[in-house]
Image (cartoon, rainbow, N blue to C red):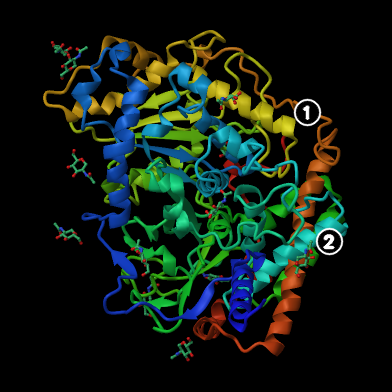
Amino acid sequence: MFSIKSLVGLLTVAAFSAAFEDSVADYAPAVNIDCPDLESTEFVREWTASNQTLNPKEAAYVETRLNTTISQAWDDWLGDSSQLGYNTSSFLGNFPKIGIAIPGGGLRAAQYGAAALSGLDARNSSAKSAGTGGLLQVTSYLSGLSGGAWITGSLFFNNFPTLSELVFGNGQDLSGWLLDLAFATPDGDDLFSEYNQYFFGSILWSVMSKANTGIDTSITDPWARMISYHFLNQTNRANFFTNDSAHGAGQLWSDIPTIPAWQQYQTPFPILVTDSRPQNLNTTTFLTLDPTVYEITPFEFASFDPGLSAGLNLTFAGTPMKNKQPVNASACVTGFDQAGFMMGTSASLFNQILDFAHNTLQGFSQSDGNGLLYVLSRQLSQVRTREDDVANWPNPFNGVKTTTYDDTNSTWLSLIDGASNGENIPLGPLFVRERGLDVIVTLDGSADDPNNWPNGTGMLFSAERASTILQASHQQFPPLPQNAQDFIDTGARERTTFFGCDPQRTPPEYPLVVYIPNMPPFNGDDPTANTGTFQLQYSPKQQQVLFDQVHSNTISGFVPNTNEADPNFGKCLQCAAVDRARYKLDPVVNRSDFCQTCFKQYCFDPKNPPSLSEVPNRKQTFVDPDPQGLGNFLSENESKLIGGAVGLVVFIVLLVGGLIWWKKRKNRQFVAQYQQVSALHDEEGENLKRYSQYVRPESYEMPSHQGSVYRD
Ligand SMILES: *[C@@H]1O[C@H](CO)[C@@H](O)[C@H](O)[C@H]1NC(C)=O
Ligand SMILES: *[C@@H]1O[C@H](CO)[C@@H](O)[C@H](O)[C@H]1NC(C)=O
Ligand SMILES: *[C@@H]1O[C@H](CO)[C@@H](O)[C@H](O)[C@H]1NC(C)=O
Ligand SMILES: *[C@@H]1O[C@H](CO)[C@@H](O)[C@H](O)[C@H]1NC(C)=O
Ligand SMILES: *[C@@H]1O[C@H](CO)[C@@H](O)[C@H](O)[C@H]1NC(C)=O
Ligand SMILES: *[C@@H]1O[C@H](CO)[C@@H](O)[C@H](O)[C@H]1NC(C)=O
Ligand SMILES: *[C@@H]1O[C@H](CO)[C@@H](O)[C@H](O)[C@H]1NC(C)=O
Ligand SMILES: *[C@@H]1O[C@H](CO)[C@@H](O)[C@H](O)[C@H]1NC(C)=O
Ligand SMILES: *[C@@H]1O[C@H](CO)[C@@H](O)[C@H](O)[C@H]1NC(C)=O
Ligand SMILES: *[C@@H]1O[C@H](CO)[C@@H](O)[C@H](O)[C@H]1NC(C)=O
Ligand SMILES: *[C@@H]1O[C@H](CO)[C@@H](O)[C@H](O)[C@H]1NC(C)=O
Ligand SMILES: *[C@@H]1O[C@H](CO)[C@@H](O)[C@H](O)[C@H]1NC(C)=O
């Protein structure tokens, strides 16, 4: 029997479940909401280069974790450390603070980063028994950029599982990265296939939901949604082409502190890096080191560059601000910090790709290439949005640091790939003085040379930025090879190398840097991890072989002049991780004989540099472990690969076409709900550039460490 009351109850339940059903439209931020009290709320924090402060919540998380989980993890990793010739208990309370940086380079970097982390993870038994597994557990910070941002975000939004479960799934709640389904055309090359159309439809639905709020969208938004399908946790093979799941829409970067592993202090503190194209710069060419570099943490969108030294509470990203306050107390925005959009912002290289298409399409006839570009630029020139090829963020720092901040007069920021200024490794945040890191472990998966191996260029750019622009705000780098050629000639890029082993001062004048490059297999096997940056699809076998090979390289170290694994490498890595603790004791404890021997082998001594001949018989050329693996991709020749890239470009054209349609419709039907931003938008008329108005250099130079579309 139904009473009215229970009927009402039922209806309420129905309404509630409808309201809370996950939808791809959850990608839309909430706009025009009442701001918290302007007087008592600090939206934007400021500090100075000489007196930095961290966000209090960051400081508290990192310190509590150091005192609890990490202090236990050191014990688990080192035991009593007699194997190193030390006594762990003498280091208590003085263990070094460690950060790991994961570089950019598309899916190559994401997979290389995951596999390298698995080699440092105590939860992996082979890493544990090699002695390398355990470093991840004592790490306080994890920074990621571009492809490295994807693995970073993926770890958190899947509750910090083991790396192989993350990448390959666990047959239960984790479905893995599904990299055999291509990013842009998951149902194969035919854009008009039924399933590709479903997929595009869902993506457009998300993007339009956001655009519908009046916030300017761009190509970064569909890109963000594609990233979410693979790296966030709500997509599996069964629901990939459906609207049954939000596919990660509505998951916010500022929600990371609600994740169970975070609440148990099991995870490092994550930071993404993104660059900016200042508003007064009207070319899209390669950035210099000058423009402001930003970071995104679960608490803040910030920059520790001396010129800005300010951070916005990430919850309010997207809110129009001036002089550190919302411009309209009843027009705050929340939900702008979509996890996919944060990862997409850090990987927003479209300002490069679209230009780069000149080169991308080399394999095509000139006319085909030109035709595509022509269509693309015509389409884009119609879109009435701020900038089409960057991540558009309302600038929360408008009116902040008026004399030193490059975008202080801008109402919008144009954020772009974190490697756009040449820094392909997110080292900046880890060198911030106030974070006080003692050891920085840097992975490097840059595609600097024609075989897609790194040559140190990314780190050299960061060292240069630190010694010039960031001198007042950041720690300095230890001595590095002079240049890329030096990285090559010393072999430092083909083996794990420690930098800064012998500081001259106490406390040390720079952190110790452990450099773990993506490198040819130590044992002389054919390399499989040096794939192209724009390869947007991998067969399961390609993924597995790459992963296992990088894992094995990471835990094996090297024995000079051989192709053998070093049985002592795990302990040598422990020596490096714990070394800075010695300098915190009074008197400074001497380095043990065992660690001294390790350091002789693994350290870069600028006065007596190592040599390339120590790493013999390394194969450089990529060999596809699964040439027939994917029927529609990468099979016998490059043209398929190029097809993938063209697929992406064509897809973008379609999306943008969709946006044009939507914009026109919107102009007719909707009164802009997001009035403040719309108003700003109009004020900024002269900044409302069209794609075709940008300076288009004939031969655009893309930072080559991101790699070319071609594998060779
Ligand atoms: C502030 O925002 C509200 C929408 O929440 C809008 O109705 C109002 O007109 C705005 N005020 C100004 C001064 O723009
Ligand atoms: C540094 O900044 C903090 C917080 O803003 C402030 O309390 C402190 O007085 C400052 N210290 C110096 C030396 O200026
Ligand atoms: C962490 O430990 C240090 C030194 O042992 C102590 O000063 C500090 O108060 C502790 N912090 C927390 C959050 O427990
Ligand atoms: C390590 O040091 C502690 C005190 O600092 C001492 O009690 C212990 O015996 C030492 N262990 C070894 C193996 O020397
Ligand atoms: C997926 O992530 C969301 C947000 O972090 C979380 O609420 C949910 O529990 C996760 N689901 C699974 C299966 O891990
Ligand atoms: C999901 O919804 C969008 C928008 O309504 C639509 O274009 C797309 O085809 C839908 N996908 C499926 C599988 O129904
Ligand atoms: C922007 O471009 C125009 C012409 O294309 C040039 O005259 C002007 O100096 C440029 N401005 C800046 C800040 O580079
Ligand atoms: C950001 O603001 C929200 C809402 O006022 C608040 O709950 C949160 O603690 C703030 N975050 C930080 C890092 O201060
Ligand atoms: C910002 O605008 C003011 C006033 O127009 C000008 O004096 C100042 O140079 C501008 N600052 C920057 C960094 O462009
Ligand atoms: C450890 O990693 C290796 C290499 O990828 C893998 O084969 C193995 O299954 C992993 N073990 C565990 C327990 O995750
Ligand atoms: C530490 O090393 C110095 C110089 O090598 C040596 O003189 C000193 O005796 C050593 N101290 C200890 C405690 O072994
Ligand atoms: C190192 O890599 C960069 C690309 O990041 C490239 O321009 C440069 O030529 C390379 N240097 C050497 C010496 O190979």
Q: Position of residue 710 (x, y in %)?
A: 73, 40
Task: Out of 420 and 209, give the one closest to the viewer.
Answer: 209
* Residue 165 in which image quadrant: top right
Judged from the image, the quadrant occupied by ligand 10 is top right
Q: Nearer the viewer, mark 1 or mark 2?
A: 1
Q: Which residue is mark 2?
A: 371
Three-letter code, disc 1: Asp
Q: Is residue 628 visible?
A: yes
Q: Position of residue 290 (x, y in %)?
A: 42, 56
Q: Is residue 191 visible?
A: no
Which callout, 1 or 2, points at the residue further toward the start of the chain?
Answer: 2
Left or right, residue 8 beside residue 329: right
- How many callouts does the rendering have? 2
Q: Residue furthest left?
A: 587
* Residue 437 in which image quadrant: top left
Q: Residue at x 56, y 31 (%)?
A: 115
Q: Residue at x 28, y 24 (%)?
A: 579
> In which quadrant of the rendered image does the N terminus lie?
bottom right
Q: Position of residue 380 (x, y in %)?
A: 71, 70
Task: Out of 238 and 620, give the one closest to the viewer.
Answer: 238
Three-letter code, disc 2: Gly
Contact between labelled residues 2 and 1, with CB atoms less than 8 Å apart:
no
Q: Which residue is mark 1?
A: 626
Left or right, residue 698 beside residue 326: right
Q: Position of residue 200 (x, y in %)?
A: 76, 62
Left or right, residue 575 beside residue 710: left
